[in-house]
Image: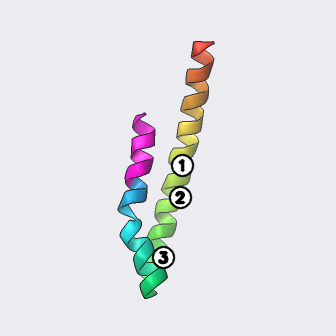
Amino acid sequence: MEIFNQLKEIIADIEKDVDAFYNKGNKAAGTRVRNAMQDVKAKAQDLRLHVLETKKEKE
């Protein structure tokens, strides 16, 4: 559950940058969004593996 909360936190943290990039044309904000999305990708993979491990333990 901790990994899921970390994912939500990353998404919440970049909300302002997403707005700045799409609505204000701030290119630096776009770079920050792209970097954060790489973090999301890594955390999502970690969560997938954790779910799989937990599922196997319960079988």
Q: Position of residue 50 (x, y in %)?
A: 54, 31
- 10 Å neighbourhood of mark 3: few (<14), some, or many (≥20)? some
Pick the residue in front: 32 or 10.
10
The question of residue 6 being in magenta is answered with: yes
Rendered residue at 44%/70% (across/down): 32
Q: Position of residue 30 (x, y in %)?
A: 48, 76
Location of residue 17 by image quarter: bottom left
Q: Residue furthest bottom?
A: 25
Q: Are marks 2 and 1 in contact (CB under 8 Å)?
A: yes
Which residues make up the magenta segment?
1-9
Mark with earlier residue (3, 2):
3
Left-right relation of 55 to 8: right
Q: Can you identify the residue that label 2 sits on?
A: 38
Q: Is residue 58 visible?
A: yes
Q: Height in image: 28 above or below 11?
A: below
- Quarter of the image containing the C terminus? top right
Q: Can you identify the residue that label 3 sits on?
A: 30
Q: Element type at marker 2?
A: helix
What amino acid type is highlighted by mark number 2? Gln
Majority secondary structure in the magenta region: helix
What amino acid type is highlighted by mark number 1? Ala
